[in-house]
Image (cartoon, rainbow, N blue to C red):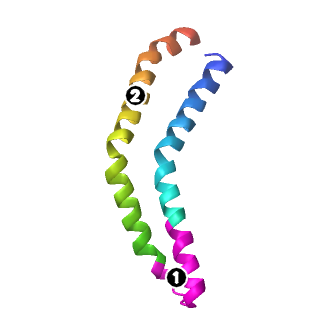
Amino acid sequence: MSEEMVMNIGTEAIKTMLFLAGPLLVAAMVIGIIVSILQAVTQINEATLTFIPKMIAIIVVLAVMAPWMLETMQTYMKDSIQNAGEWVKSSE
């Protein structure tokens, strides 16, 4: 297996992981910033106040994005399995 092939495999894995985790992390970050601004304005400093809105936002984003996420994971796994034979041949 060549160095270029290993780098391509790693790049695709990281890219797929970022595509799948990105929407959830962005939703949690946006809700966290909004709640932090509201806490600063109202001077309510309760650490647990951000937990429930973040969880609700993540569940909503997951429910909306689930079909796309599953399709992305299936495409990645299908490509990985199809290329496994090529990876084995090139390592010999």
Residue 44 in the magenta stretch? The answer is: yes
| Depicted 27 relative to depicted 2: above or below | below
| Depicted 62 relative to depicted 19: above or below | below
Q: Is residue 92 visible?
A: no
Circle 2 residue: 75
Residue type at numbered disc 2:
Thr
Q: Residue 33's x, y, as percent?
A: 57, 70
Residue at figure coordinates x 55%, y 89% from the top left: 42
Disc 1 crowd rating (10 Å Cα; few below 14, some 14-19, many 20+) is: few
Numbered label attached to residue 58: none
Toward the right, the furthest residue is 3
At mark 1, the secondary structure is helix
The majority secondary structure of the magenta stretch comes to helix
Residue type at numbered disc 1:
Ala
Q: Earlier in the sequence, mark 2 or mark 1?
A: 1
Residue 55 in the magenta stretch? The answer is: no
| Depicted 16 relative to depicted 66: above or below | above
Toward the bottom, the furthest residue is 43
Numbered label attached to residue 47: 1
What is the magenta range? 31-49
Residue at figure coordinates x 58%, y 78% from the top left: 37
Give the quarter of the image for residue 82.
top left
